[in-house]
Image (spheres, rainbow, N blue to C red):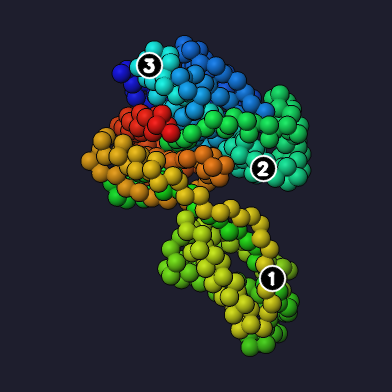
Amino acid sequence: MPLNPKRTVAELKELRALTGDENGAQRVAFMPVWVKTRAWLKEKLAGLPVETHTDAAGNFWATLRGESDRALLMGGHMDSVPNGGWLDGCLNVMAGVEVLRRINEQYKGKPPVTVRVVDWADEEGARFGKSLFGSSACSGALDMTEARGLKDKQGVTLPDALKAVGVDFEKVKDSGRELKNAAAYLELHIEQGPVLLDMDLPLGAVLGTFGVERHALTFHGQAAHSGSTPMNRRKDAFLAAGKMSQEIYRITDRNGGVCTIGSCTTKPGIVTSVVEECRITLDQRHLDGKALAQMLKEAKDASERFAQAGNVKVSWERLWQIEPRPFHPELIELCDTAIKETVPKSHRLPSGPLHDAAETCGAGVPTVMMFVQSLHGISHNKIEDTKEEHLELCVTAFDKLATKALAWVEKL
């Protein structure tokens, strides 16, 4: 069948030239370049006998009707962060388009089950700080009250930004009807991290997306003159916070997963005062829900211990939480097999970053992801890159996965 991975690479380069500049990709959702990107995507689909439409949440769908209404979904997102990488998100969609071309040729426009490619709207959340907008609206998980109040740096609200591109915010959850016949969802993505790079492997099967516990911890001490206050008399909020920065590494040593203290602010924040208040943000992630809960408990216990030792107090505020989303075991096996049929060795790994696949999984759609190696182990950066031969391999392997998943769906 006429699968052409080189065409996918060429189209990705074409997209880079169209929507990027010297600082990287500029496909921020709901902005003019993103609108231009959508138009370009529609042009690439023009030669296929597919139905295209934009759903109530702004997600774009291309549907090749099959003998059965049961649907195999392949997806990703064309939007990027500002100054982003050239592959993040759009590789997923364009590989799906190439696989759709092959399926159309093989089955002469009528596959045994319906095949759909989706470009989810605003996966990145770069403009409004709300990731997975389109897919969470579709899954039903979107917090409408929270989303309704979101504003960008210019003070534009999310509902107004959506209205400008023809989307009625109050109806975005109507997009959930798109998953009515969804029998499987496949997503290809650059790894964005260094695991496959360090193992010198091009491809990996993804076990699921990490659950996340994100909190703000505030240590409350007492301001005092930095010159006149003896060390043993201080109630130094920063001292306890500093101990937490070391403890998170011990927590992951015991439990696995990852922990990050991403920000730290102090009050009064002057060089001549002992710190009265220190606020840090803690992000904890793990694929196993029980392990994630244990990590959180250990962090809370440690914070109380360090606060007591420093004669200060500590308070916690949950910022955000999502359960681990393990992918479908049978689809993981199919993904692993497809990789091994393409390259000598596969590796199974969890995804630390969230993806739209987490929302399809959460909505009950059998889901799996495939990763391709990222050079430098970095993403959300203009230096993001993947070897061309690896890009071609991942399109080939993803096509094999789609073939296996199509047969799997047909038997349901």
* Closer to the camera in the image, 245 or 101: 101
Question: What residue sits right under mark 1 in the picture?
Answer: 315
* Rendering quarter of residue 238: bottom right
* Rendering quarter of residue 331: top left
On screen, residue 349 versus residue 154, left or right, reads left
Q: Name the amino acid, label 2.
A: Leu
x and y percentages locating residue 145 in the rendered image? 76, 45
Total label count?
3
Question: What residue sits right under mark 2 in the picture?
Answer: 142
* Closer to the camera in the image, 130 or 179: 179
Q: Secondary structure at mark 1?
A: strand
Q: Secondary structure at mark 2?
A: loop
Examine the rendered structure and indicate whether residue 163 appears above or below residue 378: above
Label whose residue precedes the other's in the sequence (2 or 1): 2
**What label does residue 396 carry, if any?**
none
Label whose residue precedes the other's in the sequence (3 or 2): 3
On screen, residue 31 versus residue 109, left or right, reads right
Q: Is residue 74 visible?
A: yes
Of badges 3 and 1, the one in the foreground is 3
